[in-house]
Image: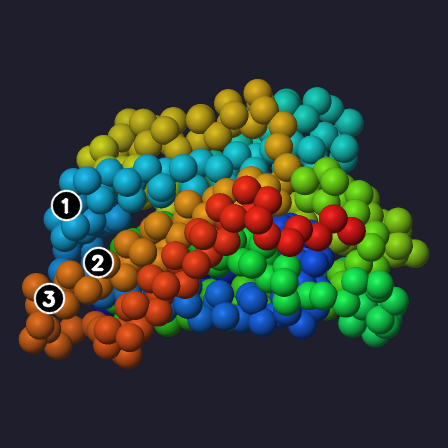
Amino acid sequence: MKKQPSLIGGSCVIASVCVGAGMLGLPSAGAGAWTIWSLIAITLTMLVMTISGWLLLEAFQHYDIRASFDSATRDLLGKEINFINNLAVYFVGCILLYAYTTSSGLIIAQLLDISSNIAAVLFVLIFSAFVWYSTKAVSRISVVLIAFMILSFVFSISGMSLHIDLNILFDRYSHDSEYARYLMVLLPVALTSFGYHHSVASMRIHYGEERKAQKAILGGTLIALGFYALWLFSIFGNLPRDQFAPVIAQGGNVDALLNALSAVIDSQQVSHAIHVFSMAAILSSFIGVGLGLFDFLADFFQFDNSRKGRSKTWLLTFLPPLIMSLLFPFGFVMVIGYAGAVATIWTCMTPALLARKSRQLHPEDSGFKVKGGKVTIYLVMLFGLLVAVFHVLAMLGKLPNYLG
């Protein structure tokens, strides 16, 4: 009898996809909203994004086990919506891989004293090989990375937690006591922090059915939420709100955040642990996002699972983000915000529309179904629409923007 894949492995894949963007983007994006409102934002986002992933599973259950967004969306919603959705999926996947590649290049370049471009190329060539090899390889390395992240995370958190100042954590020294008004700017980054949806099809492939994939998704988003909450408490309890100004001025770049933390933490070991943890978070998300985009492109272009077919998919998955990383600098939080705005299409709108259409076509179906009826579907759509509107308003300068 064939051994069933573990829920822990699948949960770690989902968590690893989420954690990179959130760990590195949320502190700077949440500096305005600060501790309480940031926790409210990420908890609400986690709930909505978990449900929207389940809605995707509900729609996918009527298709071949290797089917992804492209197959289901084209069949249920038509070519025009499918084209928009495919563009959004590819854009967000590319922009995240681009962000992770550039961030890793900056960190590795500092550690090894080499060019950031050379570091980025080495990073992509070495770690994308796991994705090229198989989903099983990604699952195994994800478990290792999550374990590695936990160890470095615990070490850095334990070091920072010893120095948490409640006055800093709850911003009692600040002259700006407005927090809720900065929530709208935070939500696009929070949404990206739970943007695992391109891996839903991969989970279904991995388990061969929907209910185990559902549990793995919930396990993964809960792990991510736990990481985020502890991370925000530790950073917001050590780095005063007004000291985020230079980090925000540099676009929330990861190296700027790490340098700011190093300046306020009086421990070389803890500072090194934070750097190691940040690198593990980037790596785990790079591999997880890469797997989701890889499976999506393989389905879209109908590349087979041979070495030649997987090599073609590899080129389309990793080469464009690498070239962008080598040519253009970026502000990490700004890029993640763009990804969040566009991601609302395929993390909220499309899953809700797919589930609604699937229920219309299979009204008597007794298979996998998300609870809550039409209310659940429309709430997910509304959340996605609001997040997209908030980002557009922020780009136009119509929302309060905390500058430190």
Disc number placed over residue 365 in the picture, else none = none
The residue sitting at 28% across, 68% down in the picture is 377
Q: Secondary structure at mark 1?
A: loop
The residue to which callout 3 is attached is 360
Q: Position of residue 260 (x, y in %)?
A: 82, 48
Q: Position of residue 124 (x, y in %)?
A: 53, 32
**Up-down relation of residue 324 to residue 382 (above or below):** above
Q: Residues within 10 Å of mark 3 (few under 14, many from 20)?
A: few
Question: In this image, 62 relative to 288: left or right?
Answer: left
Q: Quadrant of the N terminus?
A: bottom left
The residue to which callout 2 is attached is 354
The residue to which callout 1 is attached is 78
- Among the two numbered marks 2 and 1 on one chain, the one whose residue lies closer to the N terminus: 1
Kind of residue at disc 1: Gly
Q: Nearer the viewer, residue 201 or 329?
A: 329
The residue sitting at 38% across, 46% down in the picture is 292
The residue sitting at 39% across, 33% down in the picture is 317
Q: Residues within 10 Å of mark 2 (few under 14, many from 20)?
A: many
- Among the two numbered marks 3 and 1 on one chain, the one whose residue lies closer to the N terminus: 1
Q: CA distance from mark 3 to mark 1?
A: 15 Å
Q: Secondary structure at mark 2?
A: helix
- Among the two numbered marks 2 and 3 on one chain, the one whose residue lies closer to the N terminus: 2
State the colouring used for the structure image.
rainbow
Kind of residue at disc 3: Gln
Q: Position of residue 165 (x, y in %)?
A: 86, 70
Q: Nearer the viewer, residue 163 or 187?
A: 187
Question: In this image, 288 relative to 402: left or right?
Answer: left
Q: Position of residue 112 (x, y in %)?
A: 75, 30
Q: CA distance from mark 2 to mark 3?
A: 10 Å
**Up-down relation of residue 109 to residue 239 (above or below):** above
Q: Secondary structure at mark 3?
A: helix
